[in-house]
Image (tube, grey):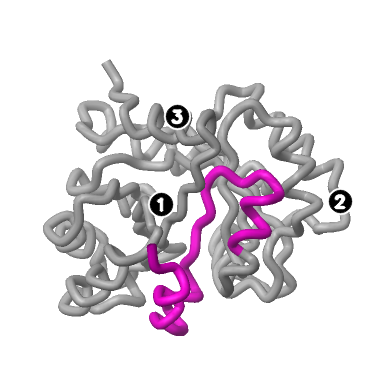
Amino acid sequence: MMRQALYQEIIQAKENNQKLVAVLIDPEKIAISHIPHFFEKVHQSIITHVLVGGSTDVDKKMHRVVEKIKKTTQLPVLIFPGSHEQITEAADGILFLSLLSGRNPVYLIEQQIQSVEKLIDTQLEIIPTGYILIDGDTETAVQRVSQTQPISQKNHKEIIHTALAGQFSGKQLIYLEAGSGAKKMVASAIIKKVAHQLKIPLIIGGGIRSKKQLNAAFEAGANMVVIGTAFEENEAFLEELKK
């Protein structure tokens, strides 16, 4: 039977209006030797979850990075895969992503099929997640790798309908993502409208570089906010997120 402990904790947090904050670690952008030092700061912050993954993993560091993180922290570690090649049993779970905003079958279903051999007898908790790329006013690695276009932030209806299509098709999470290095985060008005319609937890990521933006996402209805680029550019940002 598939484990649901991590997902149930996310559901419980949604019901209790508990704010979840995840740090996104790209294996290509962190030195394995630096991980313990980085997590000294993470453990003093409000971070509740760790996501690991990126659009690419040229140096095949994913397993080693996750293994080191698991030796360093008790926080839940979830794979945020750019492809089926980034799956490792060293993590606690995986966001089983489908890129709903694009129409490239490779990222709607083909990558998922290719991952089955690794996941069929897995100990990882698998969480079906609808991934929706929103225009963050810059071309992202997701766009380049997936060869798909983000949804314009002006098109609220399409964003809402895409999120609901994900929910109706059985996704357990919806992830609105402005993309790594985004100049603009997902607008509060969009977060609010999507959160109002959804019955499942909503994750927001991309372009969040300040505590003010983090709080704005939560106030609009995000259940989990993911921060990645801000830490890559300036680890001191963790100081703003101290408990």
Q: Where 159 falls versus 25 (above or below)?
A: above
Categorize mark 2 by other alpha carbons within 10 Å: few (<14), some (14-19), many (20+): few
Residue 107 seen in render: yes
Residue at 24% in and 67% down? 61
- The percent coordinates of residue 243 (x first, y second) are 38, 62
The amino acid at mark 3 is Gln
Tell me the SS state at disc 2.
Answer: loop
For residue 215: magenta?
A: yes
Residue at position x 15%, y 63% from top? 68
Residue in front for this viewpoint, 56 or 73: 73
Residue found farthest to the top: 1
Q: Earlier in the sequence, mark 1 or mark 3?
A: 3
| Residue linked to disc 1 | 80
Question: Counting residues from the N terminus, which is met first, the one under dot 2 or under dot 3?
Answer: 3
Above-or-below relation of 95 to 70: above
- Residue range (magenta): 214-243
Amino acid type indicated by mark 2: Asn
Callouts 2 and 3 close, C-beta under 8 Å:
no
Mark 2 to mark 1 CA distance (whole Å): 26 Å
* Residue 232, numbered circle: none
**Residue 155: image tag:** 2
Q: Amino acid at mark 1?
A: Phe
Count of labels shown?
3
Judge the density around disc 3: few (<14), some (14-19), many (≥20) Cα neighbours within 10 Å. few
Q: Earlier in the sequence, mark 2 or mark 1?
A: 1
Using the image as rendered, state which of residue 117 and residue 234 is in the foreground. 234
Residue pointed to by mark 3: 12
Task: Choose between 137 and 187: the one closer to the eye.
Answer: 187
At which x and y percent is residue 133?
Answer: 65, 54
123 within the magenta span: no
Residue at x-position 67% and y-position 51%: 219
